[in-house]
Image: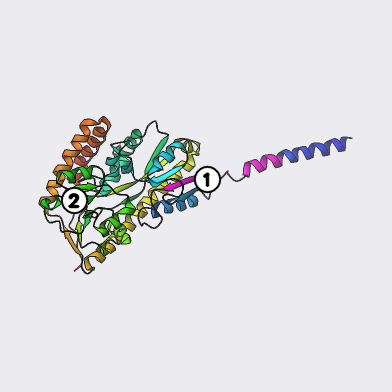
Amino acid sequence: MKNRSLLILICAVFVVFLIWNTSLFAAPKKIVWRAQSSYPAGLPQLYAPADHFAKVVKELTNGQLIVKMNPGGSIIPSKQVFDGVSSGTLDMGCTWAGWWIGKFPASVLFGNSFPNGLQTQEMLSWIYHGGGLELWNEMYKGHNVVVLPPYGMLGSENFCWSRKPINSLDDFKGLKFRTVGIWGKCLERLGARVVSLAGGEVYPALERGVIDAAEFATPAIDRKIAFHEICKYLKVPGIHEPCAPLETLVNEKSWAKLPDNLKQKVKVALQFSCFYAINLAMKQDAEAMNFFLKYKGLNVSKLSPEMIEKIKQIGDEELDRYAKKDVFFAKVLKSQRDFRKLVEPYADLVRLPYPYAK
């Protein structure tokens, strides 16, 4: 009996050990996020950084967090990504803040889509160290959304593609110009007839002459769409959008459920993907612009200093007008302007001219 009792005791201890050992060394539960971009897979610099981020997260977490990234329109319409994340239809959205100007007027400041906005390094510094990310989250407070640092960053856009030459401010008068937001209000003050078109409608509208001119994106993206095949004129620089942070949205509940160690890895993955995107875009945009400069029949020219100064003036006036109507808009605008006053004198002091290759 004693031997039997001892055997039973040993077996019981062994079973308990197995149960404890299994729970201790069991693989962590895999977390799968449903995510969508606002952009189709074929557009460089827009979808690619989101896809890159998803791959980096998987590697950093050893597969514990899987972000299933989908191209624009796969789950919900591209311009409903914010609502999708807010409702929980999506755990994550990779998009651009300027789309939500109808709900959140200050979103255009985070999208940097207005004349003479912050430059790339200024914008990232303001987001990370100047209170920008905190203000970004404040804007969406109460909508079940957490804003994380940008997953990517576009460089300067082309100013516009046109079927007619634009050599002075007078040339904007009567020009049917596709654009959106505050920049559209500025162009209207210059006499343009602003037309709002979805991205996919811009090329055919230019081709058929429904519009005379359009701004769309960066050189690399515009080359992919092939505007150079239907327009005779390309104007630079893109003073209306010197850079554009790409917005990273996460559902508040999805973020809260994520363990702290994975939250940190998500943030690291975003930093890495943004760094990757900025440096890749520099090369891609330079290659595209060199292509445009050599493309037969395409006239590439710069805005005159006088045109740039007038556009900057009108832009500041429009921003001030918005600020008078919206307290939060005024708060964000002041933050950006104050940060600019801090960093620009230093930047001008140490900036060196490019040693262009001869």
Which residue lies at the image location 45% right of the left edge and 52% below the top edge?
Answer: 56
- Locate the N terminus by quadrant: top right
Camera-side residue of 342 and 338: 338
Judge whether residue 328 can be spotted in this image. Answer: yes
The amino acid sitting under disc 2 is Val
Image coords of residue 5 (percent x, y): 84, 35
Q: Residue 200, image x and y in percent? A: 34, 54
Q: Is residue 38 magenta?
A: yes
Image side of residue 6 versus residue 285, left or right: right
Going by the numbered disc 1, the residue's amino acid type is: Val
The segment highlighted magenta reads: 17-45
The tag earlier along the polypeptide, 1 or 2, is 1
Numbered label attached to residue 32: 1
Determine whether, in the image, residue 157 is placed left or right of residue 314: right
Query: Does the magenta run of residues contain 238?
Result: no
Q: Which residue is mark 2?
A: 350
Q: Judge whether 354 appears above or below 194 on screen.
A: below
Packing grade of label 1 (10 A; few <14, some 14-19, many >=20) is few
Depth check: give the residue in front, 222 or 18. Answer: 222
Q: Residue furthest right?
A: 1
Label 2: how many Cα within 10 Å (few below 14, some 14–19, many 20+): few
Secondary structure beneath label 2: helix
Q: CA distance from mark 1 to mark 2?
A: 46 Å
Quarter holding residue 96: top left
Secondary structure of residue under mark 1: strand
Q: Residue at x 50, y 37 (%)?
A: 257
Q: Residue at x 49, y 44 (%)?
A: 33
Pick the quarter of the image with the C terminus: bottom left
- The location of residue 225, given as percent across then percent down, is 32, 60
